[in-house]
Image (tube, rainbow, N blue to C red):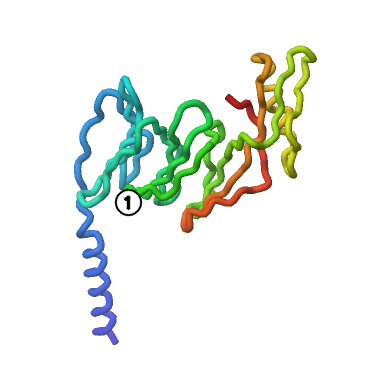
Amino acid sequence: MKKLTFTLSLLLVLLTGCSGAGKKKIELPPLEDGQTICLENEDVRLLDHETDNTFYIIVQSKYKDGKSFETPEGTIFETIMGNSLVVSQGTGNIRTLLVYNLQTGEEKARIENFFSGIAPVPEGDSAMTFYIYNEDTAGMAWDASSEEWVLYGDLEEGMQNSTIDEAKRSCEEHLFPGLCIVPLQKHRMDLASWIVTPLKEYHWSYSE
């Protein structure tokens, strides 16, 4: 029995040593002009790289066999969720949400009309929620002649909530004819299947 226990212990040590043997650390280069660190951990360093013409994210692996890559131009860092890098691309607050596998650099999901004014929220490492703008839904426009908000379209279930008043108050100092506030719909993405599910939850906000 003692011999068996010793043999199993030795095997465990050998396996543990082998699992870490292939992960050779490398020294990352110093930051260049226009680069700032978004996030850094024991595995990767994420850089926000800005030039005169564009901006994007650089993923630098700290291991020789790790994957380093760059996101498309016009992307900004949003968050890290488990093994997924989340960035958004575009100008203004209605953008494209992109999700990458940090180990392979593979693009796993692309979501249009993401509202960047509300950051994606993780649900552990298995899912995240975010808000989407739909131009076909109802909204409210400021009418300067009557000095009132005018509803256009039909409100769906869940759209009538307290965030309408919050959105109106946020616009009080910048009112102009045709200014709109719109309901943004909450969505959940499963980070294993990449399936996006719309939820009956809405948050009203100013629309550019």
- Please identify the quadrant where the C terminus is shown: top right
Q: Which residue is mark 1?
A: 103
Image x and y of residue 110, in percent: 45, 44
State the image quarter where residue 54 is shown: top left
The single residue placed furthest to the right in the displayed view is 146
The single residue placed furthest to the top in the displayed view is 145
Image x and y of residue 3, in percent: 24, 84
State the image quarter where residue 57 is shown: top left
Tell me if residue 24 comes above or below residue 117 in the rendering: below
Tell me if residue 100 comes above or below residue 15 in the rendering: above
Nearest to the observer: residue 1 or residue 151: 151
The amino acid at mark 1 is Gln
Image x and y of residue 151, in percent: 75, 28
Q: How many marks?
A: 1
Q: Residue at x 61, y 37 (%)?
A: 134
Q: Residue at x 49, y 33 (%)?
A: 95
Badge 1 density bin: few <14, some 14–19, many ≥20, Cα 10 Å = some
Tell me if residue 73 comes above or below residue 177 in the rendering: below
Tell me if residue 30 comes above or below residue 110 in the rendering: above
State the image quarter where residue 88 is shown: top left
Where disc 1 sits, the SS reads loop
Q: Residue at x 38, y 34 (%)?
A: 38
Left or right, 119 with respect to 167, comes to: left
Nearest to the observer: residue 103 or residue 20: 103
Q: Residue at x 64, y 48 (%)?
A: 199
Left or right, 161 with respect to 109, comes to: right
Image x and y of residue 111, in percent: 49, 43
The single residue placed furthest to the bottom in the displayed view is 1
